[in-house]
């Protein structure tokens, strides 16, 4: 990849970290499978270019356990997922030429490729279906750009209607995420290289983006992904190059983000490689979870609007946890450990919100993400 490589810049792999709990509260997550959907279809993405991954795998879940994978042929470098009805959209993170694929999942266990279109940039690392259902938005990491792709009849994708490119004050822009806000009025893109979150308006009639705000974070913060709270009035921005979470207020009426505070994603005194990966929130809005590569942990935060507090970190059970997902019942975490090539699952205590110890593992080389159908 050009500039800052997503796969190589972080340095040597760190060993799996031991579980750490902050304060006196211990995770006592139950190992029950209550709430799990037996036989649920799970999609797993992995890298293929210069790696040993499969691209796109399909697995079935019985209780908490993921069964053997079946590879969907011809879908390379799958690194992010989103869905609209019976169509699954995935990034194909090629560089310098990236693509986005549309797959028919009318039969969830047998995805069929509908078409594949250019992302108009390199290393598309993230995508999301706009809430209008009319567009797929994708973030090109190595190009530092965001592309708008129209959804055609039957779920296929059309050629780009717009492409916007970010510019860093120093170094190179690296767009890492693009989502719309809970109202659907605004589109936000998190750029690691530009240390910024860009806010755009999207003309749904034309598929054109217009820059509305650029929230600049401190140089070297490296914002990676954000997640909105349950009220839609706050956004939690996970930083990759500093192991921190920036708490920001969000005004949907004016489309304005305002940074309020910074919360550490690791315990005091942590040293060595400390690179947060993914952030997700529980449905009740009480907890945020983040992976941290290096110590190889899952961090748990209590959240209440502007008040965010790190309450626990536990081992991910693998090396380099790039991504985590909660199952639909929110009883289990599924962590994609890229360098150990494993998806691990950890129980979640519904009362405390805390993850317990790893309960199982599935081998998937160069894995990067898990998505529940």
Image (tube, helix red, strand yellow):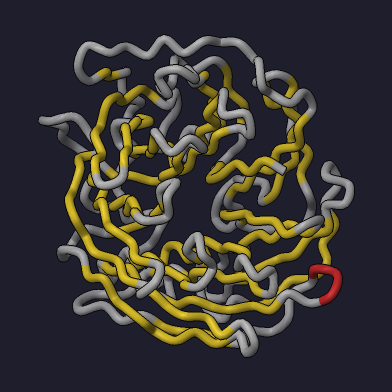
Name the residue: 17% across, 51% down: 261
Quarter the C terminus occupies: top right
Q: Nearer the viewer, residue 307 or 178?
A: 307
Q: Nearer the viewer, residue 41 or 46?
A: 41
Q: Quadrant of residue 57?
A: top right
Residue 265 in percent (x, y) is at: 25, 38
Judged left or right of residue 226, residue 209 is right
Q: Quadrant of residue 309?
A: top left
Name the residue: 65% across, 70% down: 132
Residue 290 in percent (x, y) is at: 38, 39
Name the residue: 55% across, 34% down: 326
Name the residue: 64% across, 78% down: 149
Q: Is 312 above or below relative to 276?
A: above
Q: Quadrant of residue 147?
A: bottom right
Residue 316 in percent (x, y) is at: 42, 27
Quarter the N terminus occupies: bottom left
């Amino acid at each position: 990849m050009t500039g800052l490589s997503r796969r190589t810049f972080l340095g040597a792999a760190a060993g799996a970290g031991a579980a750490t709990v902050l304060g006196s509260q211990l995770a006592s997550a139950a190992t029950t499978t209550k709430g799990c959907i037996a036989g649920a279809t799970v999609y797993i993405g992995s890298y293929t270019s210069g790696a040993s991954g499969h691209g796109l795998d399909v697995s079935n879940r019985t209780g908490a356990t993921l069964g053997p994978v079946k590879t969907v042929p011809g879908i390379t470098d799958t690194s992010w997922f989103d869905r609209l009805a019976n169509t699954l959209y995935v990034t194909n993170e090629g560089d310098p030429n990236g693509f986005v694929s549309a797959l028919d999942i009318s039969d969830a266990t047998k995805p069929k490729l509908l078409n594949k279109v250019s992302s108009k940039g390199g290393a598309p690392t993230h995508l999301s279906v706009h809430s209008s259902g009319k567009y797929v938005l994708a973030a090109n990491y190595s190009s530092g750009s965001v592309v708008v792709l129209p959804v055609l009849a039957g779920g296929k994708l059309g050629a780009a209607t717009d492409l916007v490119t970010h510019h860093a004050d120093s170094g190179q822009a690296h767009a890492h995420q693009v989502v719309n806000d809970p109202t659907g009025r605004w589109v936000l893109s998190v750029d690691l290289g530009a240390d910024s979150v860009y806010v755009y308006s999207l003309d749904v009639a034309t598929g054109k983006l217009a820059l509305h705000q650029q929230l600049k974070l401190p140089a070297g913060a490296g914002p990676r992904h954000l997640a909105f709270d349950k009220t839609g009035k706050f956004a939690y921005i996970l930083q990759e190059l500093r192991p921190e979470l920036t708490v920001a207020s969000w005004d949907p009426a004016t489309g304005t983000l305002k940074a309020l505070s910074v919360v550490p994603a690791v315990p005091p005194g942590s040293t060595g490689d400390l690179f947060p990966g993914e952030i997700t929130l529980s449905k009740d809005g009480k907890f945020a979870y983040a992976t941290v590569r290096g110590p190889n942990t899952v961090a748990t935060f209590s959240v209440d609007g502007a008040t965010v507090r790190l309450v626990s970190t536990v081992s991910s059970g693998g090396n380099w946890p790039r991504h985590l997902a909660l199952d639909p019942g929110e009883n289990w975490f599924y962590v994609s450990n890229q360098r150990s090539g494993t998806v691990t699952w950890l129980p979640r205590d519904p009362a405390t919100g805390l993850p317990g110890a790893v309960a199982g593992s599935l081998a998937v080389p160069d894995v990067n993400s898990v998505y529940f159908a």
